[in-house]
């Protein structure tokens, strides 16, 4: 018991409390009439300070009618996720590009560009709907992640398999932060199939040579301060090889390793890729 404005300022509440707030300025009237003849309307508030460096658990609902100020990175109990997708580009049965080489279902980039003419992550249309046309699988983030691991028989040099991933990353600080993304990738530069990375539409990185499933790279991705960024990865297939006779095969491998999906301090994943609208190149 006591005066909240005097006796308990700066003190440990030390247990479970129930607070009853009563409008003492209201004047009750006899039954059958409005509840109050005169209502002394007023506002009240209470400020709580936590000194513990440990986690604070709220088992019920937290309802905030005003402003919620967070002094660190906020992760409101949502899963850490990214999104991925994969596709082939050429119909060897009738000798045509899928969809007549229509770029609309391929992120705004024609299938022929993806596997014959150096399609890059930043080549995709500047719209989240375009990204979601091919990057549409929801994946959970771990410290490491196998995005795609596929071996397929190659019927011609025209077709290829492409794997993609998109991340939405929040930098809640006032400084740019570098994320060293380490991943295995395949690529066939000689056939116009390059691996690439883009943050917010920039030409961040692309492969410089033919790459097999054991090829690894560390790309330093600079995540800008005070904003949410979109990071897109594109990984095509490896060079072909002869397994026996005239059977040709290729690999499409893309995997994060060395715990590089554990982001540096100040960065966090946000789960809004499925609902984001407008331009991602900004």
Image: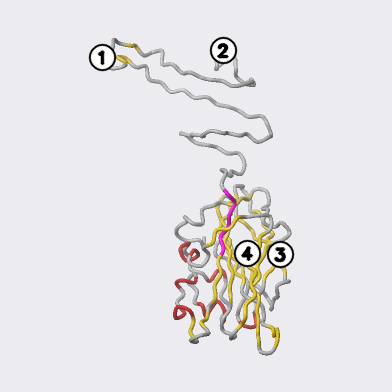
Q: CA distance from mark 3 to mark 1?
A: 77 Å
Name the residue carrying label 2: 2
Q: Residues within 10 Å of mark 1 (few under 14, many from 20)?
A: few
Q: Residues within 10 Å of mark 4 (few under 14, many from 20)?
A: many
Magenta stretch contains residue 69: no
Which color scheme does this rendered protein use?
A: secondary structure
Query: Decide: marks 2, 4 in contact (CB < 8 A)?
Result: no
Q: Residues within 10 Å of mark 3 (few under 14, many from 20)?
A: some
Up-down relation of residue 78 to residue 14 (above or below): below
Q: CA distance from mark 2 to mark 1?
A: 36 Å
Q: CA distance from mark 4 to mark 1?
A: 70 Å
Say which of marks 2 and 1 sits in front.
1
Say which of marks 2 and 4 sits in front.
4
Part of the protein shown in magenta: 79-84
The spot of residue 44 in percent (x, y) is 46, 23
Q: Residue furthest front?
A: 245
Residue shown at 60%/17% (left/top)?
8
Name the residue carrying label 1: 32
Up-down relation of residue 183 to residue 77 (above or below): below
């Amino acid at each position: 018991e006591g005066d909240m404005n005097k006796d308990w300022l700066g003190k440990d509440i030390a247990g479970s409390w129930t607070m009853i707030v009563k409008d003492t300025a209201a004047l009750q009237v006899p039954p059958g009439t409005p509840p109050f003849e005169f209502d002394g309307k007023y506002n009240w508030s209470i400020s709580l300070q936590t000194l513990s460096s440990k986690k604070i658990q709220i088992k019920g609902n937290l309802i905030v009618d005003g402003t919620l100020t967070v002094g660190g990175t906020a992760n409101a109990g949502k899963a850490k996720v990214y999104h991925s997708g994969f596709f082939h580009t050429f119909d060897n049965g009738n000798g045509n590009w899928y969809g007549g080489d229509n770029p609309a279902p391929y992120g705004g980039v024609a299938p022929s560009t993806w596997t014959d003419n150096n399609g890059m992550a930043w080549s995709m249309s500047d719209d989240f709907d375009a990204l979601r046309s091919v990057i549409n699988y929801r994946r959970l983030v771990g410290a490491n992640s196998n995005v795609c691991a596929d071996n397929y028989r190659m019927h011609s040099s025209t077709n290829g398999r492409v794997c993609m991933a998109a991340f939405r990353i929040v930098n809640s600080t006032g400084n740019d932060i570098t994320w060293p993304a380490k991943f295995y990738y395949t690529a066939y530069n000689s056939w116009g199939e390059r691996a690439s990375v883009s943050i917010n539409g920039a030409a961040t990185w692309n492969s410089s040579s033919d790459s097999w499933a054991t090829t690894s790279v560390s790309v330093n991705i600079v995540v800008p301060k005070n904003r949410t960024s979109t990071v897109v990865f594109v990984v095509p297939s490896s060079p072909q090889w002869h397994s026996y006779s005239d059977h040709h095969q290729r690999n499409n491998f893309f995997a994060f390793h060395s715990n590089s999906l554990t982001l540096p301090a100040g960065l966090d994943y946000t789960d809004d890729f499925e609902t984001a609208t407008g331009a991602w190149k900004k």
